[in-house]
Amino acid sequence: MHVGSYLLWAFVATLVLSGGMYAAQEAGLSRMSIPFLLGAAWTTDHRRAVATGSLLHAFNGLVFALLYVAGFELLGTATWWLGALGGAAHAFVVLTAGMEVLTAIHPNMADDRQGPTPTRWLEPPGLLALNYGRRTPLVALVMHVVYGAILGAFYQV
């Protein structure tokens, strides 16, 4: 593994993914803020939740990039389309199992079977995170495909 290449492109891909998700939220294409959802597990203060969640999301981006890099190394090649395929699979897992697990373990999130309570005040994402907007699955898919394509295009095997 080329550590320098991994760190650089994992950071860039994570920055583009996070920036794209934020831009989509600001454009009204989605109400989902992964940094806020992650951070709200640790604090109920909105600004602190976003800051904490942003750090957690950046860390997650670096960790997940290791899986992509391991796959590239195993195959002996890294291409944009291989990374994009990995990104599509990544988005599928995030939007299905990831959202279900988040609902189950998040201390401040209601689940689909019960409404909000004083301690569980966050809306659950629902199937494919559709509770955060009809375009949310598409936004998440596109941004994860871009994340993977960046890693595949620029990581040096």
Image (cartoon, rainbow, N blue to C red):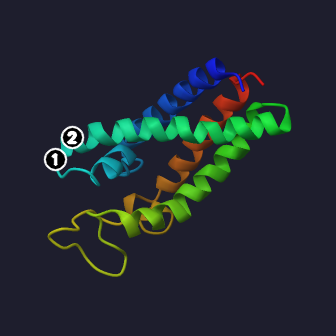
The x and y percentages for residue 22 are 39, 38
| Distance Cα–Cα, label 1 vs label 2 | 5 Å
| Percent position of residue 15, x then y | 48, 29
Element type where label 1 sits in the image: loop
Residue type, mark 1 in image: Asp
Disc 2: CA contacts within 10 A as few (<14), some (14-19) or many (>=20): some
Which residue was labeled with disc 2?
48
- Residue at 38% of width from left, 51% of height from top? 32
Query: Position of 66 compared to 133: left or right?
Result: right
Q: Specify the quadrant that holds the C terminus.
A: top right
Q: Within 10 Å of the Cα at label 1, are there few (<14), some (14-19), or many (20+) other Cα atoms? A: few
Q: Are marks 1 and 2 in contact (CB under 8 Å)?
A: yes
Q: Tag 2, which secondary structure? A: helix
Q: Is residue 28 visible?
A: yes
In the image, 121 versus 137, the foreground residue is 121
Residue 9 screen position, x and y as percent: 60, 24
Q: Residue furthest top?
A: 4
| Residue behind mark 1 | 45
Which three-letter amino acid code belongs to the residue tagged 2? Arg
| Residue 18 in the image: above or below residue 107 | above
**Residue at the image position 57 percent from the left and 24 percent from the top:** 7
Q: How many marks?
A: 2
**Split into 4 quadrants, where in the image is the N terminus?**
top right
